[in-house]
Image (cartoon, rainbow, N blue to C red):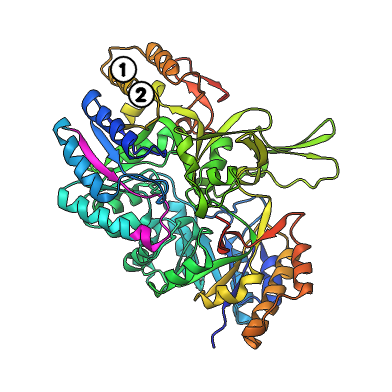
Amino acid sequence: MKISIGPALFEWGKQALRDFYRRMAFETPADILYMGEVVCSKRNNLDPEELVAFARELQPSGKQIVFSSLGLVMTEGELATMRRLAALAREEGIWLEANDLAGLAIGEGQPLAAGPHITTYNTDTLAMLAEIGVKRAALPVELPLTSIAALAASRSGGAPEIEVFAHGKLPLTFSARCYTARAFHLPKSNCQYRCGDFPDGMTMSTQEGMELLTLNGVETMSDAVFCGLGDLEALRKAGVDILRLSPQSRNMKEIVEVWHQRLLGRLDGAEALARLRELNEGRAFCNGYLHGRAGLDFIDASRQQATWGL
Amino acid sequence: MKKVEVLAPAGNLPSLKAAVDAGADAVYFGFRNATNARNFEGLNFSEKEAETGLAYAHQRGAKAHLVLNTYPQAGDSDLWHRTVDLAAGLKADAIILANLALLRYTRERHPQLPIHLSVQASASNYEAINFCQRHFGITRVILPRVLTVGEIKELKTHTDVELEVFAFGGLCVMAEGRCYLSSYVTGVSPNIEGVCSPARHVRFENRGDKLQTRLGGVLIAQYDEGEEAAYPTICKGRFEANHQVYHVMEEPSSLNILEMLPQVIEAGVTSLKIEGRQRTRSYVGAVTKVMREAVDAYYADPRRFHPKTSWIKALNSTSEGTCHTLGTYQEGWQ
């Protein structure tokens, strides 16, 4: 299985983004890099032209670069950006990752990846997506292993490729409203880019102190870190081609290395999991979705025991 | 002038009759299986009931839309295909679908059956809408509750697909059809099983002088004695963020567009949808009656339209202690 680095979902600013992806490109064994703004069109991410220039800069790394696009498209300005991004991707021979139907609509016929926000729940949909140009589908994060296996098995000739979310805070939903701005009593129209102060999002806890979700502007994520490491064998058997590791502000390079070593069999499961726990600095893990349970549950496959995702 | 449609929910046959009797132009309902959202216990229609309901509506000049808006899992589309065939056989006036593969199946097998794109398909821009028109011949889209009225008006200039918008009732504040908050804490997905925040995962617990509401064991809110407790959904819960305890995403509010009815109609909307297939017959009847009167009043004198106190009172009495909001239709909500 290959390793991909997902699109950076937090507001880091252009400099930090470039530094991050340079590190991923030249200092990690990842195979694929997704770059581009998925969460909020107001953010200070690389624009389509800057993405192209940056992709050329990273080309010597030999990684496949894919341009990710916005998850909830609402305005003419956002459609215009999508058109520019799709056109440049086409010219450069770079795949476009669609995360909204608008991405599929505008990119129809050119090489596409269907991102995790495209609702690829069944085999007929996967086949249809392939017909309009989808070469790879990153499946919705809530799919259980049984569905993943059925989708993978339905393909002929191994296409489209199947990618699953394997590590990081789960992107759970989008809204038109910005919850980070709201936490500062600001409307989205005057958000003052407060999300930029939270490099891994803002934790939202229950009144009992359970850290439940992460607010990331208009996106809401799990606060627990999804970790599918213990399910690696099952994912391999299911026919998964690519594991997506979602960018976080700390220890990402080391996290990629652990996954890589585990895939090569140079680390055993328990060792690798312990190492990932260290690198995530005590944050709770979850993987319940893979097992058809509540997403926040964590099942340590090495012990096959369910534990509450706290 | 063709009036905007008043479209009412029907969780069962008595509600369907109440809606039609109260002046609904159209009703929508689903079958009693996993093919539709609002797949709550004791709700929805058998084949026989659907037939009776369609006849009741048609005899009184109303239309009936059939809902199949969940996503078939993996290779298991049989139930959905059979239900589409059933809807076509019953001569429903339209079928409401979310899944791309089902859209295609329906277009190929039943070219005469009008297709409405479900809100669960999350088509929030004209490229997405026109894509579904091009590929599947959809005639209408139900817009997710993410756009302002201004954005809806702009969108309409780029598509000839009819627009249906939510006018009253429960307020999703997320991009519908792509929200995993409920499945994150309960394991039950609206997209897969048709239920958000299912009742069997809900608990109301007394702890000292507080009433706590829980979903999948997770504390959603707690109330002092005398406070009215809202049904626990994550997006309407009280949580702690940025050192404050508050309704982090949205108050337990429901949508009511009456104040903006003229702007919504003038944005080019074809149909005003009342939410609430899970609600009672008296709710459906009361809300439909108010919407009917409001729409008629608008067309009688568009420029002097103003919501009547009696309408507001009737609507407030249906909404279980929650406040009303114009939601995202209003600039500034975002």
SS at mark 2 in the image: helix
Mark seen at residue A262 = 1
Quarter residue A4 falls in: top left
Does residue A1 appear anywhere in the picture?
Answer: no
Task: Tell me which residue sits at (20%, 53%) in the image.
Answer: A88
Compared to B178, does B298 lie above or below? below
Amino acid found under the numbered disc labelled 1:
Arg
**Residue at the spot of label 2:** A232
Residue furthest left as drawn = A60
Task: Tell me which residue sits at (31%, 31%) in the image.
Answer: A20
The reply to whether dot 1 and dot 2 touch (C-beta < 8 Å) is: yes
Quarter residue B243 falls in: top right
Query: Which numbered disc, 1 or 2, marks the residue closer to the eye?
Result: 1
Asked if residue A74 is among those painted magenta in the image, a careful observer would answer yes
Quadrant the N terminus of chain B occupies: bottom right
Residue sitting nearer the eye, B45 or A26: A26
Instruction: Please state if A28 lies on the left or on the right of B204 as rendered.
Output: left
Mark 2, Cα crowd under 10 Å, few <14 / some 14-19 / many 20+, is: many
How far from the left and from the top, in percent, is residue A279? 41, 18
Residue sitting nearer the eye, B213 or A8: A8
How far from the left and from the top, in percent, is residue B201? 65, 38
Compared to B23, does A156 lie above or below? above
Chain of the residue where label 1 is placed in the rendered structure: A
Does residue B229 appear anywhere in the picture?
Answer: yes
Q: Are marks 1 and 2 on the same chain?
A: yes
How far from the left and from the top, in percent, is residue B35? 51, 54
Task: Tell me which residue sits at (54%, 85%) in the image.
Answer: B2
Asked if residue B217 is among those painted magenta in the image, a careful observer would answer no
SS at mark 1 in the image: helix
Chain of the residue where label 2 is placed in the rendered structure: A
Specify the segment rendered in magenta.
A63-79
How far from the left and from the top, in percent, is residue B17? 69, 71
